[in-house]
Amino acid sequence: MPITKNKVFKYVFIVSIAGFLFGFDTVVISGVNLPIKNLWQTSDWFHGTFIISMSLWGTVMGALLGGYPTEKLGRKVTLTWVGVMFTISAMGASLAPGPYFFSVFRFIGGLSAGIASIAVPTYISEISKAHNRGSLGMLFQFNIVFGILIAYLSNYILTGVLGSDDWRLMLGIEVVPALLFSLLVLNIPKSPRWLIVHKKNTTEARRIAALISSEAEANHLIEAIQYEPDYNREGRSGLFSGKYNRVLKLSFLIAFFNQFSGISFILFYAPEILEKAGFATSDSLLSSVLIGVVNLVFTFVGIYLIDRVGRKQLMYIGSTGYIVSLSMIAYGFHTSLSATFQLVFLLLFITSHAVGQGAVIWVFISEIFPTRIRSFGQAWGSGVLNVFAALIALFGSVLINALAPWVVFALFAFFMFLQLLFTHFMMPETKGASLEELEKNLIQI
């Protein structure tokens, strides 16, 4: 069959909708936070621990455990269940009669988001070719960012539609894209790499590989996978064997630095940070939307660059931008410079993230682990990232009130200097190499 680039893009686009649901589900709570607190009269402790954080802890759990269904059931089946869980979560949370039911359904939504962070990058890396694997893999990140922006806009548009029940509509609207994703994902093929490694079904794998590449390339792929060392003998139990130490360390560090850039802290607490910088409440909310728009626009730039300049170069660019922007924000807070000054460097920070860590992390982690344990490796990296994101969400308000803002941003700048050293001395370039070639270079046989 002829090469069909459009088919690969179509399949990648479909699975990347899970990223939209991830982003939307994560921040939609910002619009329902106060109405729910007033309706159910929850205490600050209960509200923070259950209403706000339950989805994040579900994401942590899904990220830590998502490797198992992705590996055992397969990427396609797992993503089908992700769509079902997102649908149940949105419907259940919007109809919840009280805070306990609400928290349970929000946890389910977080669980599905965490699993999606494993299954989607894994699937995309396995059906993409080496020359465009980065840009296709970035569609997941783009959709997360797009989902975040649409959630903010949706909350704004739906305000006042149902009066005191606006929050139910804000949550329930997610059912529409969740159902759409659940139906569309039924039409994607299974990963040929997964079929060979886990089902030993070379016939079906060859048929699917021929749909997304030439017959010669399909045959080469089948042979390359079959001759991987121990391709039919390892699973989750082998992840922490000594030969994977390098890729475990790489995935841990890139996930660690992702969160200690301050990205979650800034996205979660942007209005409060901007108010401390001197903006009025209404202006801070509008500026938060501007941050979302800049994030989306420069995510496009990251998609364009990642397969042209490579992952490592983007990390150099992003790290430098982080250091400059965070240092200037710290300086601005320390010397009480204008709110506009702070906003300019917050936007530079978001730009640096979008073309640096935001562009690279999901692609890089999905590339460096071999097929036989890729989903477990993805779970490791995603789990590290989401644990730190949840901790920052939980303790961020304490940080921003207990410490002077300039101290917080100076600490983030210091960690980004360490990230620059990590990029220079430890991070390999993965651009243009096949997954099988990367295994030979990164795994200690």
Image: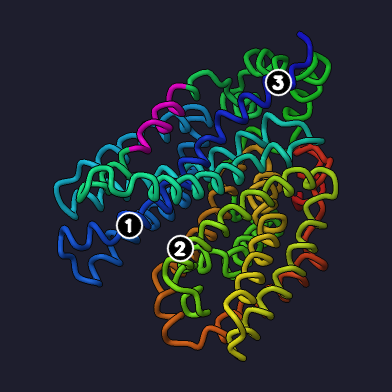
**CA neighbours of label 2 inside 10 A, class few (<14), some (14 to 19), many (20+):** some
- The CA span between labels 1 and 3 is 39 Å
* Of residues 268 and 439, the one drawn nearer to the viewer in this rendering: 268
Amino acid type shown at disc 2: Leu
The residue to which callout 1 is attached is 54
Q: Which part of the image, by quadrant, shows the N terminus?
A: top right
The percent coordinates of residue 31 (x first, y second) are 35, 55
Q: Earlier in the sequence, mark 1 or mark 3?
A: 3
Viewer-side label of 2, 3: 2
- In this rendering, position of residue 64 left or right of residue 307: left
When the figure is inspected, residue 214 is found, relative to residue 389, above or below; the finding is above
Callout 2: SS: helix
* Residue in the picture at 77% in, 43% down: 304
Amino acid type shown at disc 3: Asn
Contact between labelled residues 2 and 1, with CB atoms less than 8 Å apart: no
Magenta residues span 173-183
The percent coordinates of residue 402 (x first, y second) are 42, 87
The residue to which callout 3 is attached is 6
* Of residues 383 and 226, the one drawn nearer to the viewer in this rendering: 383
Q: Can residue 110 be seen?
A: no
Amino acid type shown at disc 1: Met
